[in-house]
Structure formats: C-alpha cells, structure tokens
C-alpha cells in the first residue's frame, strides 16, 4: 500500500473532522401531558399523537 508523500495540513484535517461531533436529538413537548418526546412520534407517556389516542396506556394500580 502506498503511503502519502506529503502530509496534510492542520486546517485540512480539522475541516474533515468538523462534522464528527455528536448532536442532541430534536425534542418537542407533548400537547396532552407536556412530557418531552421525539417529534412526529407517539408520546410514550400518554400514547397520543395529534390529539388522538393511538396506543392505549393502562394505568398501573
């Protein structure tokens, strides 16, 4: 395997690594129970999406 003849500059290395950081996932609030949830998904706490109950959540007694 051939090796690079010239070394890359720090600017070129850092430009390549500019997109390697981790991003926090987007979050929104559920309009029913005000819990944090992922957008465009059913709320895991109350089971509603766009004002309708999609997943019935049974109360723990």
Image (tube, rainbow, N blue to C red):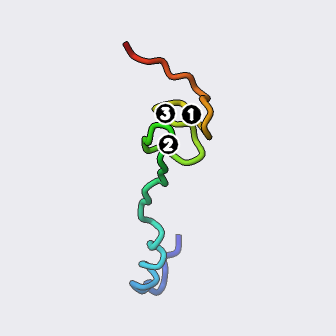
Q: Residue furthest top?
A: 61
Q: Is residue 20 above or below residue 51?
A: below
Horizontal and vertical percent for residue 39? 55, 48
Q: Which mark is residue 10?
A: none
Viewer-side residue, 31 vs 12: 31
Q: CA distance from mark 1 to mark 2?
A: 8 Å
Which mark is first along the chain, 3 or 2? 2
Residue count near mark 1 (Cα–Cα under 10 Å), binned few <14, some 14–19, many ≥20: many
Residue count near mark 2 (Cα–Cα under 10 Å), binned few <14, some 14–19, many ≥20: many
Q: Which mark is residue 30?
A: 2
Q: CA distance from mark 3 to mark 1?
A: 8 Å
Q: Is residue 35 above or below residue 24?
A: above
Viewer-side residue, 34 vs 40: 34
Viewer-side residue, 56 vs 11: 56
Horizontal and vertical percent for residue 33? 45, 37
Relative to residue 51, is residue 60 drawn left or right?
left
Q: Residue at x 44, y 42 (%)?
A: 34
Considering the numbered disc 1 on the image, is that residue within a helix, a strand or a loop?
strand
Relative to residue 50, is residue 37 drawn left or right?
left
Label 1–label 2 contact, CB within 8 A: yes
Residue count near mark 3 (Cα–Cα under 10 Å), binned few <14, some 14–19, many ≥20: some
Disc 2 versus disc 3: nearer the observer? 2
Query: Which residue position is annotated with label 3?
Result: 44
Q: Residue at x 48, y 75 (%)?
A: 16
Which mark is first along the chain, 2 or 1? 2
Query: Which residue position is annotated with label 1?
Result: 48
Considering the numbered disc 2 on the image, is that residue within a helix, a strand or a loop?
loop
Q: Residue at x 48, y 85 (%)?
A: 5
Residue 21, quarter of picture: bottom left
Residue 48, quarter of picture: top right
Q: Residue at x 62, y 40 (%)?
A: 50
């Amino acid at each position: 395997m051939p090796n690079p003849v010239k070394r890359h500059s720090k600017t070129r290395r850092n430009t390549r690594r500019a997109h390697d950081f981790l991003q926090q996932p987007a979050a929104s609030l559920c309009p029913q129970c005000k819990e944090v949830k992922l957008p465009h998904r059913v709320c895991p706490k109350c089971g509603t999406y766009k004002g309708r109950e999609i997943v019935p959540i049974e109360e723990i007694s």
